[in-house]
Image (tube, rainbow, N blue to C red):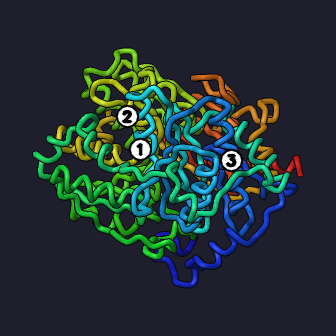
Amino acid sequence: MAHPLAGQPVPPQMLIDVPKLIAAYYELTSDPAVATQRVVFGTSGHRGSALKKSFNEAHILAVTQAVCDYRKAQGIDGPLFIGRDAHPLSTPALMTAVRVCAANGVETRIAPDDSQTPTPLVSFAILEHNRTHESKADGIVITPSHNPPEDGGFKYNPPSGGPADTDVTAWIEARANALLENGNDEVKAWRYETAIQSPNIARYDFITPYVNALEEIIDIKAIKAAKLRLAVDPMGGSALEVYQAINARYGLEIDIVNTRVDPTFSFMHLDHDGKIRMDCSSPWAMASLVALKDRYDLAFGNDTDADRHGIVTPSGLMNPNHYLSVAVWYLFGHRPRWPKEARVGKTLVSSLMIDKVAAQRGRAVYEVPVGFKWFVDGLLNGALGFGGEESAGASFLRFDGTPWSTDKDGIIMTLLAAEIRAVTGKDPAHIYRELEARHGRAYYARTDAPATPEQKKRLKNLKPDDITAKRLGGDPIEEIFTEAPGNGAPIGGLKLTTRRGWVAMRPSGTEDIYKIYAESLHSEEHLAVLNQEASAIVSALLMERN
């Protein structure tokens, strides 16, 4: 059930105290003996809050030194590209990382004028360098993505360009925590004033090469010729300057309806749980843009680091699964130069409609656990034409079948919606209704509930034998998955399937919540039963272990 203030403007009393938050980053001391105050890499790097002693200067000193040590151990000798978003903790964390990189002699590239850099532009920069140089580049993105303003985040992208695999993050996490336990005595760090003037630290224009290359992945000419009424809300994030550059370069005249950059994110509308969260797939958080749906052919939004997308049509905000299905249908019918064997990548909590559309296009599906890292190799070598997550993150290949980014790219996904509208004459929501008419309706829902770190750990380590139920939603349970069909990797939870639907349960890798996903191929009422029974299963499992 949504919070009473969900979808409403943020009340002034809910805005964070930015000076207090930044002071906590520098002044509060974390205790590595406390599990919640250690460096922990989830599905998207290390995240936490300075106020909870889970993301402060000590953490960033340690994890950046660990990255430098990893680079040295792996012989990574090219530049390290660092991007950041607009969260208040991202700037001090960038400054800390620069201090460590300079002292370790790492050739580091940061944006000019301390501007923000979206996640996909870091991935793009890494791949572009590695395509044309013998030395190998990698990157750091300082962002908690769409998380609340008080959170901070830090993730590492190796030379493959996308989120690091579990073996890499495990190494970095272990090394960082060892440094923390020794009081960071082994960390090399200069004063910021010295570091920023070091020849190791150089300014880099992330935006121009990315924007200039967009014609290699999006039919910009078709969009311009269609004279569409387009709008975008960067949600106070790093995509703002990119869309300004796109307008300047291609003359698309996309209306940027929100140019505010405010570290408190006071312009937002509250999410489903009453929190400030820059989730562009949430109808509550996106309320201000959804209100403009009748003024534009299409409107779209990105979260603060622009790795996620939200698509608003005259019908309203699209469900992420619906848009992913349409994107798969369109791309695999309009990219003739892609490898014929290229598959469709999806996470196992994404809609079965994607499988049906892939089959319609004659493409196999590669089903993996939650986390974009599972798509990196496939996008890099062309085994995947597209990789997408139900949480509104995706990327795909250039027209010629070569990689563009191996991290989520919300910018190309919004521009793709405009291309679809321009080329087909139909908005993506209309096309999805046509897919439903052909393949049948799929009823999908995701619900979140609070969870302690201990409860999250229990859910992550569930085994099939833990499930005693034999039926779900009136049907026999056919399969219980703890590993993804595509690559056999642990899913960090459970997925139960029946003849008419499925449910999955897993802890969040970024917040203190667990998630229940459910999809019915029968009806809304059946979906509600699936959700209710899945919630009961989770509650029983947690109670058994208390």
Q: Residue at x 57, y 61 (%)?
A: 194
Distance (Cα) linking label 1 and label 2 = 9 Å
- In percent of width and height, residue 182 lies at 85, 52
Q: Residue at x 84, y 52 (%)?
A: 181
Indicate which disc residue 65 carries: 3
Q: Residues within 10 Å of mark 1 (few under 14, many from 20)?
A: many
**Amino acid type shown at disc 3:** Gln
Cβ–Cβ under 8 Å for marks 1 and 2: yes
Q: Nearer the viewer, residue 300 or 210?
A: 210
Does residue 295 sit above or below 216 in this rendering? below
- In percent of width and height, residue 542 lies at 81, 49
Q: Secondary structure at mark 3?
A: helix
Q: Residues within 10 Å of mark 3 (few under 14, many from 20)?
A: many
Q: Secondary structure at mark 2?
A: loop
- In percent of width and height, residue 214 lies at 27, 41
Say how many tags the image has: 3
**Residue 76 visible in image:** yes
Residue 23 in the figure: left or right of residue 14: right
Distance (Cα) linking label 3 and label 1 = 28 Å
Q: Where does label 2 land, which residue?
A: 404
Q: Secondary structure at mark 1?
A: loop
**Residue 357 visible in image:** no
Q: Quadrant of residue 61?
A: bottom right
Residue 30 in the figure: left or right of residue 92: right
Marks 1, 2: nearer the viewer: 2
**Amino acid type shown at disc 2:** Trp
Q: Nearer the viewer, residue 179 or 280?
A: 179
The first of marks 1 and 2 along the sequence is 2
